[in-house]
Image (cartoon, grey):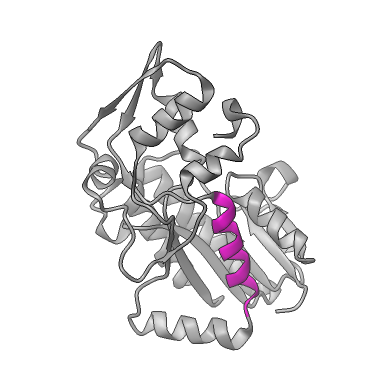
Amino acid sequence: MQQAKIAVAGATGRLGRHVVDVLSAAGHEVIPISRSVGVDVITGEGLAEALKDARAIIDVTAGSSSEQRPATEFFTIAARNLQQAGERAGVARYVVVSIIGIQKATGGYGSAKLAHEQAVLAGPVPARILRVAQFHELVGVLMEMGRQGDVIYLPEMRTQIIAARTVAEAFAAMATSPRAEFEAARATESAGTPIPELAGPLEENLASLARLVAARRGDQVRIEEVKTADPDSEAAADGSLLPGPHAKLAGPTFEEWLATQPDIGSAV
C-alpha cells in the first residue's frame, strides 16, 4: 500500500504511540483515535469523521480494567463500533493486537482478549490478528505496582518479552502490506493456519528482568515472586504465554533494549 490514511485506535497508549511514530515516519497520514482527541470507541463519538477516507484501522486499544467482565465489555463494544463505522467509511482492512497464549485461557483478561478477537473477525471489514508477547516496558510498570517499601512483589512469569517499537513496526507492515498479500494471509488463517505470533528472541523470567532494572537504577530493593490462583497468573507462571513454534522472533533482547533507555526511572 502506498502512502495512505490510517486510523490508530488507542493511539496514545504504550503501543499506540509507537505505531503512530512508525507510520508517520513512513509518510502515512495517521488519524489518532483516542478520547484525548475527542474520539471515543465506546460511545462512537467522532468515529465517523476520524475514519473518513481511511484505508486501514490498527486497533491497539486497551480498557481501564484487567478484570474479565469489564474488559470483555470494553473490547466487544469497541470492536463492534470500529467495524460498523469502518464499513460505512469504506475502510479496506482492520488489524488488531492480541496476546500469545490466550487460546488456552480459562478466564481472566485472556478470555476478554479472545472475545475481542472474535468480535473483530465477525465484523464486515476484512481483519487480521497479530498475537504478541509482553512488552519490555511492562517490567517497570509491574515493578511500581508491586512495590511495598524495600520489597517488590512480582507474579511468576515466563515470557519471551519484546520491545513495543518492534511490535509497532510489525503492525505498520501488516496494515500497509499489498492487498494480495493481506488477502492471501487472511485466507490461510481462515482455513486453520495458526494466528501469527511475534515474540522476543529469548525466554525470560520477569523477576530476573526486574533485577536488571533495579541494578541499572542503583535500587537496593528486594524482588520476590508470588503466585496467585487467578487464571492470568496461572498462565503467566506455567509457560502459556510463551510463543508457539510458528512464531516470528525479533530483537532487541531486553538487556539490549535496557541499555538504550536514557531515563531508567520512567522509561521502563
User: Does residue 63 appear left or right of residue 117 in this picture?
Assistant: right
Question: Which residue is at 58% across, 88% downward?
Answer: 180
Instruction: Residue 173: say if magenta.
Output: yes
Residue 150 visible to the viewer? yes
User: Does residue 217 appear left or right of residue 197 in this picture?
Assistant: right
Question: Which residue is at 58% across, 44% downward?
Answer: 14
On screen, 210 above or below 111? Answer: above
Q: Position of residue 10 (x, y in %)?
A: 61, 50
On screen, 27 above or below 215? Answer: below
Q: Main secondary structure of the magenta part?
A: helix
Q: Position of residue 178 (x, y in %)?
A: 63, 83
Count of labels in the image: 0
Residue 40 visible to the viewer? no
Range of magenta residues: 164-177
Instruction: Residue 172: say if magenta.
Output: yes
Q: Position of residue 172 (x, y in %)?
A: 63, 65
Q: Position of residue 83 (x, y in %)?
A: 57, 68
Q: Toward which corner of the image does residue 146 lie, by quadrant?
A: top left
